[in-house]
Image (cartoon, rainbow, N blue to C red):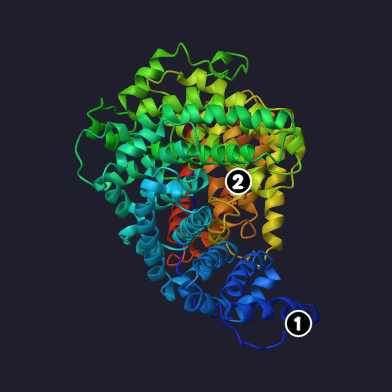
Amino acid sequence: MGKSKRKGKPKRRPDPTVGRPGKIPSDSESAAIREKKILPVLSQLSSPDPKLRSSAASAIANLIEDQKCRKLLLKEQLVRLIMEQTLTDSEMETVVAGWGVLRNLVLEEDWSFGIHLYRQDILTPVEAAIKKVISTLDSINPTFSSIPKPRQKLTWELTESLVGLLSSLSETNQELLDAISNLSSVPSFLFGLLGLEGVPEQTKDSAVLCLHGLTEENDVIAKKILEGPGWLAGLVKLRDEQSLQGIAACGIIHNISQELRGFDQGPGLEHLLDSATLPALKLSLEKHARCHIQAIETHSSGDPQLSRNELSLRLALEILASITTAAQEGTEGVWEEMAGAPKTDVMSEGSGEGSDTDQATRPETDGVANCVDEDAEMELVTGDESGNVGTSRLIASGSHEGVITYLVEVFVPLVLPLATPITSQATETTVVYSRALSALNNIAWTAPLIMSSPNFSPGKEAWASFAQRIWKLAVSPILGSNTADIPLADSIASLAWALSRSVGGRIDLVEGEHRSFMALYRAARGLATSAPAAQTNDHSKDIEEGIIDAPSLGVKCVGVLGTLALCPSRIDVNREIGVFLVTLITSLPRTPTDDAVEALNQLFDVYADEAFDYDDPVFWGDGLLEHLEAAVPNVRKMAKAVDKRKQPDLRGRADEVLMNLWRFIKYKKDEKAGRC
């Protein structure tokens, strides 16, 4: 899953770092904290005694972790004091502590604080400090061990603060990211840390993670790395290490490969293809997943090594999700020409729309022919890749088809155990679990795009086994738990939609599972109704803040139900779902527009052919056509109510579904007349 950057234009708002100095807080608790903690330490920050200044800066860095103290410090113009006095102090210890204060503030405050620092020209002292660190490291490298330990420690503390500050600021908005990317010293500083002997591992970790963040959707940094002195070769070598740094190198190379689409680099860069990165990522993911599962089974916690392992695993899953998204978007097709790999036509009939990290698009693909036997071909799901020569050949070719085949055959068995709910974690969704679900979700949306190709090793029936197994282990337990965790329910609904659609609804359901999605839809509607912005269909704020991904949870539930209704020989299930979908349409305007649009699209798919065994007893037997005809005026009003200037995509989809509704009604009438 690619990392989400907050690149929206900030609204005009009060300066977050200034207030009226000396104004006593109205509540007694804050007033007491100000008198006892804030004012004394700020006074010491301007003391003529260098030791007092240093200790004051260090104390402030710790106080910032407390929100109440942080807000009080900011009201006393802390940022101005740090930038004007502390960063220019004659004592290195004080300067280092000052940079630590700024780094911690950016971490603790929201994105507007980073914008404010940028407007205060924070990048000028940042670049000066970076150049000073580079000069220091260049001069001490040959005799590093002879440098006094306190001086070494301060150097690495300063380096950590600068790298951390760059990482946080680069995530603020596009303007700030561009400004950092154009600092000539940044890439040489970060790559210098990776190549220098004696640099602490924690500092190297921070540097490579900063590079990973900077290279995402950033052609400026990508080009600088390509032109740098051995930087790219170093990353390729580092990629093979099964460590946090090796995993980050996989992500950096993947990011660069995406940006190279805009450059005319020609052949010879096959080592940058995702097909070259995936085998290295597989080994790292395998190693860290094993450690993670063992730690859970033994109830181990608190070990710093385990925390580093979890960070590595989270990053590996994020990169895997991003590579899968790129595969769906067809970017490997561009690379095939650059690398001279065999071309295929598997994407020529449409690859679906582009997707976010958590994809919930509607790819065009046929369902499999028969319902699934969950035990069939399960050797494909057990993770035994040793004999899979076809997969190895495909991934080695660098083809788009090979990448997706490798994702399915190799990574699904690796990721599925991480996406399976664990009893000991039932009360809390871990980050690893969440990212494993996201990675599986992306694979499930991507695999069907080529699974009908004769060169696709698993084939339709084998993918059906994968899909059923994923459903059984990852989806069913959450449905059975009636979770109140909305982000988790959102992830499960997206995954379920992908799985069900990929096999034409032929999922062996536990009794009543389709009703769980109806209940989840109602819960989502209830949640939306209780929210302040309940009257709109615009979920952009939730999406930006990472609460939900587009489309909404309600739309995902509708999508799951519609695809589940496609399975033959389940007339009772089809009837319940058909009535549910039609009820959403007849309930307009109470039904949100995006939900109604998806419900209509699903109805068109489900009842598209009179040959379906449920068409006659449900569509005609239950009189669904009459209900749809009666709903046409409300569907027309629904479409016209969408402001095409504010929501052009939704308006376009609403207009399209209205036109298709007319055509569908006529088609069904003609279809029935033809039988008479």
> Of circles 1 and 2, which is in front?
1
Q: Is residue 13 above or below residue 562?
A: below
Residue 649 shows up from this direction: yes
Instruction: In this rendered view, identify the residue nearer to me: 280 or 142.
Output: 142
Three-letter code, disc 2: Glu
| Residue at the (30%, 35%) spot, across then down | 333
Please give the label number shown on residue 483: none
Q: How many marks?
A: 2
Q: Secondary structure at mark 1?
A: helix
The answer to whether 597 appears left or right of 428 in the picture is left
Numbered tag placed on residue 626 in the rendering: 2
Does residue 119 sit above or below 169 in this rendering?
Answer: below
| Measured Cα–Cα span from mark 1 to mark 2 | 69 Å
Residue furthest toward the right?
28
Residue 123 in the image, given as x and y percentages of width and height: 40, 68
Which residue bears the numbered disc 1? Answer: 31
Q: Position of residue 449 (x, y in %)?
A: 42, 31
Q: Is residue 613 visible?
A: no
